[in-house]
Amino acid sequence: MTPLRLALLPYPVERPDGVPAFAAKLDRLLAEAKASGANLAVLPEYASVELGASLCHAAPPTEAAELAAMVDAAPEILAAIREAARRAGLWLLPGSLAMRDADGLIRNRAPLIAPDGRLAFQDKQAMTRFESERWGVSSGAPPSVFETPWGRIGISICYDVEFPLHVRAQVEAGAWLILAPSCTDTLHGFNRVRLTAAARAVENQCFVAVTPTVGEAPWSAALDVNRGQAAVFGPVDRGFPEDGVIAEGALDDPRWLFVDLDPARIAAVRQDGAVRNHRNWQGAVPPAPVAGFA
């Protein structure tokens, strides 16, 4: 398998006045990633929720009104994101969208989009208190893995990465890289994601990449404050940094972080590391299924 040039964006929350403006912003950002040689671009959880205040036409917007507007517009937003990925010629994880299922429930869903527009989804499984108690977002499908030109990868959305078995199911299915897009309004929240992402990298001898929303949005009921930084963590073992930090951006810095990752390094450390966390895992975990692109 060939190395991957990963692009992580701490997404700068703004106030686009509609889906076309959001798409134009996405085109500009993805063009920057493409120009720097990226193969796969990752945006944070709920990045598109910056549209909520404009779409709901409420003054001031409420959490419920923003959510309803985002759910109604989800098909249009997803179509715009697919076209942006096609135009850029990139693999794209554009964060996540609040989408209504056939059963009537709303779920937090992350699409992984290929450069030709094919896509597959990973739902968020563990809900934060905000999602379950104030937004009414429901737990989604169990973890899957995704076939890419660089091997199998997993997506563990924000709070999900704080639970070892979610990531372990993906690793058991062959994932060497876990993408953990997040949306956190305090450094307490971001550091929970950061510290547990680093732990998942150690216990599974894999790479885990995080990237958050950043900036203040006093005009939005949902995205009022956003804190964090982009980072990639890896095994704490020979051949890797002593603190496990492969790369890290500055706090609250809305610029791309580019990282070159080689799956062969993960295969090597799992085979002959100073320790064998991946092999010595205690307890059986069923492997995640492979998601189908459509």
Image: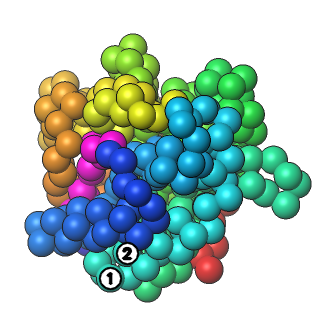
* Disc 1 packing (10 Å; few <14; some 14–19; many ≥20): some
Q: Assign a secondary structure to mark 1.
A: helix
Write down the residue under mark 1: 87
The answer to whether the residues at label 1 and label 2 have Cβ atoms under 8 Å apart is yes
Residue 191: image quadrant is: top left
Judged by its main secondary structure, the magenta piece is strand
Find the magenta span and give its range.
3-13
Task: Give the left or right position of residue 293, taking residue 271 as reference.
Answer: right
- Image color mode: rainbow
Residue beneath the point at 31% across and 69% down: 24
Residue 151: image quadrant is: bottom left
Task: Give the left or right position of residue 278, taking residue 39 as reference.
Answer: right
Write down the residue under mark 2: 84
Query: Residue 5: x percent and y percent?
Result: 21, 63
> What amino acid is at disc 1?
Arg
> What amino acid is at disc 2?
Ala
Against 170, is 87 above or below?
Answer: below
